[in-house]
Image (cartoon, rainbow, N blue to C red):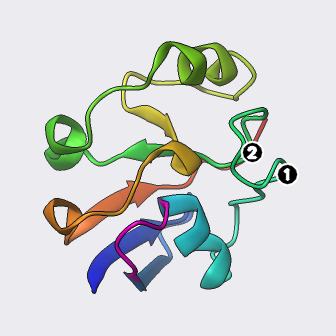
Amino acid sequence: MTKITFIEADGTRHETDAEAGATVMETAIMNAVPGIVAECGGACTCATCHVYVDKEWEETVGGPSAMEEDMLDFAFEVKPSSRLSCQIKVKDELDGLVVHVPGRQG
């Protein structure tokens, strides 16, 4: 299993096990990570699963697609490391991934 750590805005850490092929958002929901709302269920039609990819992981995770960039316009406090967690597929290369959950979702 791939390990993913979610860090809340207050610094609380949630270390999770993720299944290959799932998304980072699905992993957050299955592990009841606070702050990941996921209103659209992963359809990339909202911005309520917004995360900041930790600096060390930005290159490995990669950037958002054009459709994802459009949806990030609806997120609060977007940064260069912003991604929608529903669009990040879990794979072996992401073992140890760290993402930060914003203080509020769009």
The residue that mark 1 highlights is: 39
* Dot 1 or dot 2, earlier in sequence: 1
The residue that mark 2 highlights is: 48
Q: In 3D space, how far apart are the residues under numbered discs 1 and 2 (Cα atoms)? A: 6 Å
Mark 2 element type: loop
Residue appearing at x 29%, y 79% in the figure: 3
Mark 1 element type: loop
Foreground mark, 1 or 2? 1
Q: Quadrant of residue 21?
A: bottom left
Residue appearing at x 20%, y 48% in the figure: 57
Residue 79, position as x, y percentages in the image: 46, 24
Above or below, comparing residue 97 to residue 16 in the picture? above
Q: Is residue 69 left or right of residue 30?
A: left
Above or below, comparing residue 26 to residue 53 in the picture? below
Q: Is residue 60 magenta?
A: no
Residue appearing at x 38%, y 22% in the figure: 80
Q: Main secondary structure of the magenta part?
A: loop
> How many C-alpha atoms fall within 10 Å of the one at disc 2: few (<14), some, or many (≥20)?
many
Residue 58, position as x, y percentages in the image: 23, 38
Q: How many numbered discs, if any?
A: 2
Q: Residue furthest right?
A: 39
Residue appearing at x 68%, y 15% in the figure: 73
Q: Is residue 98 left or right of residue 44?
A: left
The three-letter amino acid code for the residue at tag 1 is: Glu
